[in-house]
Amino acid sequence: MTQEQWSNIRQRLLKTVGQNNFTTWIAPMVPGEINDGIITLNVPTNFFGNYVSQNFSDLILHETNAEGLDVSRLNFALAAKPAANSETAPEQAKHTTAATKPPAVPPSVTSTAPLDPRFSFDNFVVGKPNELAHAAARRVAEGGPVTFNPLFLYGGVGLGKTHLMHAIARELQQRQPEMSVLYLSAEQFMYRFVQALRDRKMMDFKELFRSVDVLMVDDVQFIAGKDSTQEEFFHTFNALVDQNKQIIISADRAPTDIKDLEERVQSRLQCGLVVDLHPTDYELRLGILQSKLEVQQKTYPGLDVENGVLEFLAHRITSNVRVLEGALTRLFAFASLVGREINMELTQDCLADVLRSSERKITVEEIQRKVSEHYNIRLSDMIGPKRLRSYARPRQVAMYLSKQLTSRSLPEIGRRFGGRDHTTVMHGVRRIEELKQSDSQIAEDLELLGRALKS
């Protein structure tokens, strides 16, 4: 790749991602060789490479191919030294260092991690699975008196935790610019702590973290098992709570489920409001796609989506929002490159691998839980030894659905139903098959349960 080609790609990326993202994530990269359709991009840290890969890889691929280069994949390699071959390199290198590995005591901190302009309350799509988390985040972002401390947001990958964290920080920044808001990942907290120990600047470290108005820590599960870091985090937490300063924390699971997290830290994290961001439902996924569609159509004017495509994606891609958004970005980039309209055929061709990996695998345990809820009986009674009809029929329904919707063998299903023999499972499956033909209630129950499990 020539310097001119990379410069053209950078200019187009700047228009797409905005100045802040460009300066932080695009400018520091230095392109290497292109071999067998793979371009190597030299980056300052592994964290940097992972972030760019997750958030900008489709765009970079699109713009690289638009420049006439035959590239199908990106490879990120650690640069021997920070990028320093452009006219603004010294400033960029300094910015990158601040974004990924901040100095122990920066002069005035608003956010140590770059705030993504895409992550605001305005473009956060609210639905039943995330409405409580959204409402709590909004309340904290108003910057009024502390009502719950800490606010602890947790949920799986791509459910909106980071979006809400960035939105809170941006809102606080805009409403009360004089407020000192420190936003960083647990990994960065640990890095600063270790650096302060090494440089014998612990007093500076303590002063920085205990003098903020709002402390925001992302992915707190990373400090689990790090005893010294947990100790310092605990004392920082207590000092801020004593001063009535707001703390906002995110993690991928509830405090009690974080392995190797000290009991006293767990207890502290639970003393405020703990909010679960549930997996998205179909309506929320469709709403997210519809909101992202407008963004893509601005990037690729003239490209439209055939009716039914968004609904298809909302049904099929249920893993997380990040995958869902990435699929739509990839779809538009692909359609633009090959000059085709976005219909069902193109969608299935372009996203074949995503759709394959997103096929939801239903478990026997999930079936048992749904069936016991449907018939309003305890799960322990359904899989237990009782032979009462009120338990036996739901048990047979669950066995039938386990046979139909999972790849488990009859002996495996039997083991999950209190260690029953495979012949018992076989009898239950046959009985439900018979009843399905003659009992309209059973047929309706099976239809409802099947739909609920597949959604």
Image (tube, helix red, strand yellow):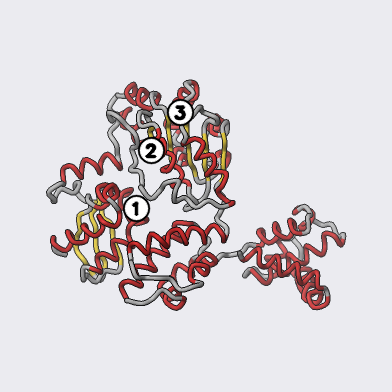
Q: Dividing the picture into quarters, in which one does residue 76 lie? A: bottom left
Real-space Cα separation, disc 3 to disc 2, in angstroms: 18 Å
Of 381 and 123, nearer the camera is: 123
Query: Badges 3 and 2: C-beta atoms under 8 Å apart?
Result: no
* Comes first in the chain, label 3 or label 2: 2
Residue 286, x across and y down, in percent: 52, 61
Residue type at mark 1? Asn
What's the mark number on residue 231? 3
Residue 412, x across and y down, in percent: 67, 65
* Comes first in the chain, label 3 or label 1: 1
* Comes first in the chain, label 2 or label 1: 1
Residue 186 seen from this side: no
Q: Which residue is depicted at the point 42% across and 62% down?
A: 293
Look at the picture and state if 84 lies above or below 304: above
Q: Which residue is depicted at the point 46% across and 22% down?
A: 239
What's the mark number on residue 184? 2
Mark 1 = which residue? 50
Residue 9, x across and y down, in percent: 21, 61
Residue 297 seen from this side: yes
Residue type at mark 2? Leu
Q: Dividing the picture into quarters, in which one does residue 382 lie? A: bottom right
User: Which image quadrant: the C terminus?
Assistant: bottom right
What's the mark number on residue 335? none
Q: Which residue is depicted at the point 43% across and 27% down?
A: 232
Q: Is residue 130 left or right of residue 219?
A: right
Crowdedness near tag 1: few (<14), some (14–19) or many (≥20) residues, C-alpha within 10 Å: few
Of 402 and 51, nearer the camera is: 51
